[in-house]
């Protein structure tokens, strides 16, 4: 596996691959890789001739007081996982390589989409995500890019951006990978102590309650959300940031839910903010 630290190195390799008619898949990550990321690399390796993964903790998507400095980093371990899953090149740039002095250009969706759900408590987050993902798209020039469905809002926002900016890239969403007890795999799970780890299953348990209700024919969003809030509130270590029901594409709130709509949540377990979601009818 090639380790590239500069934009030029990535471009030189990708140009050579493309000259040989090979297709390229991109898996953007911030490192601290887990089975969820590994499944994206597996999907990319199955769908493309060559796989590039980026490992870059992107400062522009973290707000003040968020965990930029403490975000888990273990590049050597990440490389082991990437190589094992069939990654051909990892792009591991410095902050200065991505944002050199004088850097001034950002990609921002002028839409209500980024103000919903996580956008309410993380203003500026999606501007940072869209900016860095656009840069990665321009640097790697992939045919396909792979993102996890756990970050459902990120996936919807990136699909919108790709359409709006005419990126000729297929965006592939991959299913959330879960622990045996249902907790969605996340790099931030490593922040949880033993008691918090046990409490964190409350997100999945609340979603299971809501899914069962939709299967019984309940489509009223307020009824479903109330049931989820009841489950989460029964856990003393949990504090709800949001639990909402929205249109799966536009992310605007829905009152009556239909197949394809999204029920999404962010809950603090202690000081760790976890997100999860399910798609109605999936
Ligand atoms: O999902 C993530 O890990 C990040 O938001 C991404 C897409 C790698 C951009 O920094």
Image (tube, rainbow, N blue to C red):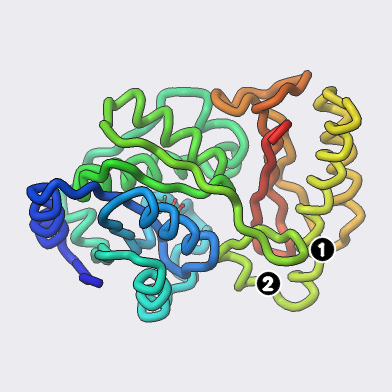
Q: Which residue is mark 2?
A: 192
**Would residue 181 be found to the left or right of residue 156 on screen?**
right
Q: Is there any visible trace of residue 59 in the rendered image?
A: no
The image quadrant of residue 195 is bottom right
Label 1, residues with CA under 10 Å away: few <14, some 14-19, many ≥20: some
Label 2, residues with CA under 10 Å away: few <14, some 14-19, many ≥20: some
The correct choice, above or below, for 280 with respect to 41 in the image is above
The correct choice, above or below, for 102 with respect to 76 in the image is above
Instruction: Check residue 209 in the rendering and tell me which mark sits there, or answer none.
Output: none
Which residue is painted at 51% across and 49% down in the image?
A: 148
Give the alpha-carbon distance from disc 1 to disc 2, as whole Å.
11 Å
Which residue is painted at 32% across and 47% down in the image?
A: 132
**Looking at the image, is mark 1 or mark 2 earlier in the sequence?**
2
| Residue at the bottom extreme of this rendering | 76
Q: Which residue is mark 1?
A: 237
Quadrant of the snapshot with the N terminus: bottom left
Q: Position of residue 159 (x, y in %)?
A: 42, 32
Q: Position of residue 134 (x, y in %)?
A: 29, 41
Q: Position of residue 226 (x, y in %)?
A: 88, 36
Residue situated in front as seen by the camera: 258 or 111: 258
**Would residue 64 be found to the left or right of residue 131 on screen?**
right
Query: In the structure shown, which secondary structural element does the residue marked by tag 1 occupy?
Result: loop
Q: Position of residue 227 (x, y in %)?
A: 89, 39
């Amino acid at each position: 596996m090639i380790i590239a630290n500069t934009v030029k190195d990535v471009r030189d390799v990708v140009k050579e691959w493309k000259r040989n008619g090979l297709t390229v898949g991109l898996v953007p990550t911030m490192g601290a890789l887990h089975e969820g990321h590994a499944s994206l690399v597996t999907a990319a390796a199955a769908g493309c001739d060559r796989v590039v993964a980026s490992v870059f903790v992107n400062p522009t998507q973290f707000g003040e007081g968020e965990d930029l400095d403490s975000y888990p980093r273990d590049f050597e371990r990440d490389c082991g996982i990437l190589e094992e899953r069939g990654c051909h090149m990892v792009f591991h740039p410095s902050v200065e390589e991505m944002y050199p002095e004088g850097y001034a250009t950002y990609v921002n969706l002028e839409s209500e989409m980024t103000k919903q759900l996580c956008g309410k408590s993380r203003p500026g987050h999606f501007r940072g995500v869209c900016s860095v993902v656009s840069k990665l798209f321009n640097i790697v020039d992939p045919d396909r890019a792979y993102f996890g469905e756990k970050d459902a809002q990120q996936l919807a926002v990136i699909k919108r951006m790709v359409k709006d900016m005419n990126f000729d890239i297929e965006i592939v969403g991959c299913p959330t990978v879960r622990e045996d007890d249902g907790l969605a795999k996340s790099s931030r799970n490593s922040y949880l102590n033993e008691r918090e780890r046990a409490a964190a299953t409350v997100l999945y348990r609340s979603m299971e309650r809501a899914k069962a209700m939709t299967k019984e024919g309940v489509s009223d969003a307020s009824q479903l959300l109330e049931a989820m809030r009841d489950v989460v509130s029964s856990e003393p270590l949990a504090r709800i940031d949001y639990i909402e029901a929205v249109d799966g594409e536009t992310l605007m709130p829905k009152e009556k839910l239909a197949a394809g709509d999204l029920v999404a949540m962010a809950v603090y377990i202690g000081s760790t903010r976890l997100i999860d979601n399910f798609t109605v009818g999936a």
